[in-house]
Amino acid sequence: MNSSGVTIVSTKEERKRFTDFIYKFYKDEEHWVPPLRMDQKKLIDPKKNPFFDNAEIALFLAEKDDKEVGRIAAIVDHRFNEFHGTKTGHFGFFECINDQHTANLLFRVASDWLRDKGMNKVLGPASPSMMDTIGVLVDGFDKDPFIMMPYNFSYYDELILSCGFSKEMDMYAYMVDTETVSLDRINRAMDIVKHRVPDLVIRPLNLKKMESEIKIIREIFNEAWKNNWGFIPLSEKEFEAAGKDLKMIIDTDFAHMAEIKGKPVGFSIGLPNINEILKTMDGRLFPFGIFKLLWKKRKLKSLRTALMGVLPEYQGKGIDALLHHRSIQNGLKGQNKTSSEMSWILETNPEMIHVAERIGGTLDKTYRMYSKEL
């Protein structure tokens, strides 16, 4: 190990220490939810994560007095740079004790690695890609995060800004619950949408035809999101891998396709918030966690609208609101769901903010992305 106290992760044992770090680090933190350990391993494994077909990663661990005190990853996503015409590197998996010196060291080694790869800017956190868990929580520390959303200590914002980064983008999580949802307003809006687009049909996803459904969703997603900040088109392999992971928890009451005369024009996927269960599992699916997950899934009280897209030529017609409406209806009706998080929504996306507020959503949490010239 060099005198700076930061090691580049190269052995199997060091990789394990890298992924295990968070479980000790947050163990006394009331609102942190331990992610599944097997998922954390897979995220950084170039053999198992199709993201690395077009990306490179370096992992670093910080130590002090023989004790791990922080970690960071430096990532080059070649497709991101091709798509945006940039030389941007990313940092991800950042965790650190409340010590500026340690944070400075971690960002210095990650930045040096990215600079050696020819990058001239660093953006993050993205762990590991812009389509995975991104951002730092800067507001809303008094509540548990929803599925696939980050949680961190409140001092992270200050640490990162003091390392010379500045805010690149804020992302919002809106909460809709049975108390705040404006059903009258939603129903009125639905009538207007149905009048405007009379041939619109909302149907549940067909899990028996998941392969073809995933293909349609990918096409709509890549088209709908292409002008959004931070977007990269997802490959077939990435979408298939995500579909495989989510199939176990997808509930067709909250996963819908919008069609006009049989043509798919939009989709919405709400995920049952399994963080309610993961909280008690210490990241372990085996030996018995899998039964707990499958058994308790039906009793979950909350969900997260995590993915939504409407083809550009059909945007602005209220189709997104109609998709939300269907999930809310189903949640109130038979499913006993009492709250739904719409996340994340870019601060620069007034249309989605308007949709969230119109159906009775309130701003619940804020997440931040940072950047720095190298």
Image (tube, rainbow, N blue to C red):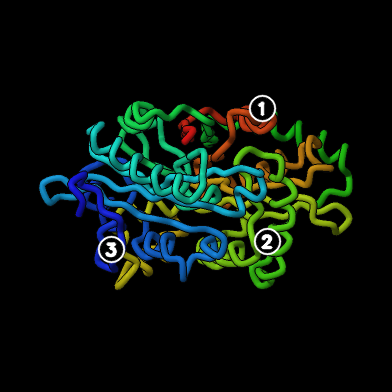
Q: Secondary structure at mark 1?
A: helix
The picture places residue 335, in percent across and down from the top left corner, at 54, 52
SS at mark 3? Answer: helix
- Total numbered labels placed on residues in the image: 3
User: Which is nearer the eye, 56 or 285?
Assistant: 56
SS assignment at label 2: loop
Task: Answer left or right for 119 relative to 19.
Answer: right
Of mark 1 and mark 3, the one earlier in the sequence is 3
- 308 displayed left or right of 108: right
Of the residues shown, which amino acid type is indicated by label 1?
Pro
Give the mark nearest the N terminus, 2 or 3: 3
Q: Position of residue 307 (x, y in %)?
A: 61, 49
Label 1 Cα crowd, 10 Å radius (few <14 / some 14-19 / many 20+): few
Q: Quadrant of residue 283?
A: bottom left
Residue at 69% from the left image edge and 71% from the top image edge: 209
The image's mark for residue 237 is: none
Please state the horizontal and vertical placement of residue 119, each as a whole percent of the image. Answer: 51, 44
Residue on which the image places disc 1: 350
Q: Which residue is mark 3?
A: 16
Type of residue at label 3? Lys
Residue placed at 43% from the left, 60% from the top?
A: 43
Is residue 350 depicted above or below 121 in this figure?
above
Q: Earlier in the sequence, mark 1 or mark 2?
A: 2
Left/right placement of residue 98 relative to residue 269 reads: left
Q: What number is the disc on residue 205?
A: 2
